[in-house]
Image: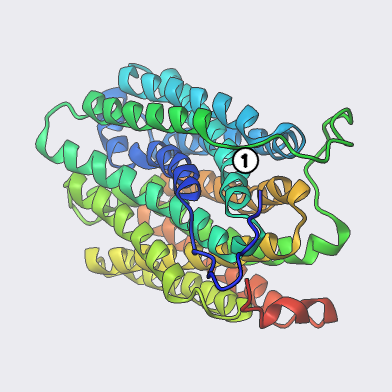
Amino acid sequence: MSEKPQPGHAIPSFTADMFRAAWTVTAVFMLSNSATPLYVVWQRTLGFSSGTLTVIFALHIAGLLMTLMAAGQLSDRFGRKLVLVPGLLAALAACALFATASSIAMLAAARLLAGIAVGVVVSAGMASVSDLGGAQRRRQAALLASVAMVLGAGLGPLLSGGIAQILPHPVVPVFVIEFIALLSALLIVIRLPLIRPAHSQHARVALRLPSVLPENRLHVLSGIAVFGPGITATSFVLALGPSLLTRLLHVHSPLLAGAMACAMFAVATGVQFAVRSWPVRAVFAAGSSATVLAMVTLCVAVHVPSAPLLVAAALLSGAGQGLGQLGGLTLINLHVPDTRRAEANAVMNMGGYLPAGLLAVSTGFAIDLFGLSGGTTMFAVGLAAVALVFGGAVLYQPSPRVADWRNAREL
């Protein structure tokens, strides 16, 4: 898939096919987070607690994790398109369930299917962006894939929050628009020039737990150590941010809830462009610091209480996720072979989303037991400690194998 540069001609940073592949990632992540401002609507109509809400939210992560067990391996063995098409069909089914949800079971099924679709795009979808960029654009491909993810994650709640602000019954219009976006992504994937992998020696080997080559484990673990706390922080904002605004701060605007989530991912997008030329070590240091600051700000926000501080905590959370994600994807694109890249993407996302789901659920039930401010404080203190310890472990890793990426700027 790589292109050979012609003498005297600079290689363009991106290609049209790279952007088309990135749109599939954006469309699915729009679906995954469009529900955020609507949870308050469903809580009111279906009547469920914060604990149940976080379980519904975590079903998304459960579907994602189950899919990551196989999607990366299947994609590396049989090609990206074979995995992406079923994933997008699952997203379309989730969209239909969201639009017609009249019970907790339907809402849970929609979240599960949306998680399956996300699992497909964070492995096969992101790898397809890199494939279409070729060997000369690996760092640019990592940036584009990462930005596509956080852009979709931000556009989804902004769209649903805006519609919920102006329409009394926003659910169906939101997911009709999402359905159209996903259908366009499906048509694009069908037409993309994604070839089957040339190396098929593992095609008949039984599926196993996703893994990475021994020489790449440090690269992937470093990404998880910073990306994991960041995605956990943003998952909290997505699951319980609207409840904090409504119950603690008495702010009832769905547009504000959606705008807060959108701004969080806008920061996650913008910060990646701002630091794209930084050494990976500096990107990881900034990511861990942003997550720790986000949790400190969140603690203050719930005890003051203050809506502006809550928004500031969300923005810092977005920065932490975006930086950790960019650093991790850059290391994978830089060091992992093409035939193992989707699987490495899967492992990094499993390492990030698993604690995000577990902590979100435990925080939801802690809020039911100890109150909104008490449960939130417990979550913030615990995550700040994790981000500090894991970030420090990455930055001060004594192994000489780290030296090849600590100051990496090339690609």
- Relative to residue 333, is residue 129 drawn left or right? left
Residue at the front extreme of this rendering: 7
Q: Is residue 298 above or below residue 44?
A: below
Give the SS element for disc 1: helix
Residue of label 1: 124
Nearer to us in this view, 148 or 291? 148
Counting labels gives: 1
Rendered image quadrant of residue 96:
top left
Residue at x 25% of width, y 66% of height: 305
Nearer to us in this view, 275 or 2? 2
Percent position of residue 32, x then y: 43, 38
Q: Is residue 394 above or below residue 162?
A: below
Residue 70 showing in the rendered view: yes
- Relative to residue 383, is residue 259 drawn left or right? left
Percent position of residue 15, x then y: 48, 53
Figure quadrant of the C terminus: bottom right
Nearer to us in this view, 326 or 58? 326
Residue at x 81% of width, y 83% of height: 398
Percent position of residue 210, x then y: 77, 43
Percent position of residue 28, x then y: 44, 37
